[in-house]
Image: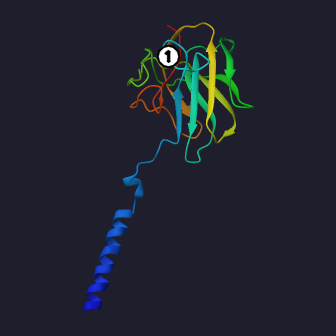
Amino acid sequence: MKKLLGFLSLAALTAGAVLVLRNPAEANPPQQLTRVLCNGSNSCCQGTGSRQFIYDVQLGGGATVSSIEVGTHDNNINDYVNLILPTNWTLQIVSGSPVHNSTCTPHGSLSTPESETPCSFVLRFSGPAQSTNFTLGYDFIPNWDHHDANWAASNGFAANWGRPVGRGIGPVHSPFIP
C-alpha cells in the first residue's frame, strides 16, 4: 500500500509540474526582438545623436534584419543627407501609406495614429542582413516639421502605437510636410 501511495504521489507531482510547465510562453510573453530607438538631435527628439534623425536598431534573441522602413512625407532623396548606414546598406524612398500622427510627441509619451492622412512615402534603409545592433541616421535639408511615424523591420517587427514614442517599441520621429 505504501508503494502505491508513493507512486500516486509521484504521479500527481509530475502531472502538476507538466501542467505548470506545459506552455512557458503563457508565463513569459515573447520579447520584442527588434527595437528602433529614436535618438535624433532635432527639436522633437532632443537626443544625443549626431544627426537630426537617428534610429538605433537593437536586435535580440538571434534576430536579423535586412531592412528598416520609416514613414515620411518627402520623396526627394536629395533632401536626406549625411547618412549613417551599415556597410553596403542604401536608402531608397518608395510609395507607401504607413500610419502616423502629424504632431511631435515627446519621447516617453503615448501617441495615437491618425487614419485619415497616412504618410505618403517610406524611407527604406536596406542591405545585407544584420545580426548585431546598428545605427541609421540622416539630416533633413528642408528642416520642415517633425512628427510621429511608424517603423517596420523586415523580420516582421513594427512600431507598437500602444507603447511610448522613441523608446524602441513605439513609433519614432521623421520629417513631416506641414
> Image point 57% across, 26% down: which residue?
55
- Rendered view: 148 above or below 66: above
How many circles with numbers are drawn on the protein? 1
- Where is residue 111? Give x, y as percent: 39, 23
> Image point 53% across, 13% down: which residue?
42
Of residues 84 and 115, the one drawn nearer to the viewer in this rendering: 84
Horizontal side of residue 86 vs 107, given as left or right:
right
Q: Which colour scheme is used?
A: rainbow
Return the residue found at the far bottom. 1
Image quarter for residue 164?
Answer: top left
Horizontal side of residue 130 vs 72, given as left or right:
right
- Where is residue 91? Give x, y as percent: 68, 24
Label 1: state its secondary structure. loop
Return the residue found at the far right. 88
What amino acid is labelled 1 in the image?
Gln
Dot 1 surroundings within 10 Å: few (below 14), some, or many (20 or more)? some
- Where is residue 85? Give x, y as percent: 68, 27
> Image point 44% across, 33% down: which residue?
160
Return the residue found at the far front. 48
Q: Quadrant of the N terminus?
A: bottom left
Horizontal side of residue 1 vs 154, given as left or right:
left
**Residue with the mark numbered 1:** 46
- Where is residue 72? Give x, y as percent: 55, 18
Image quarter for residue 124?
Answer: top right
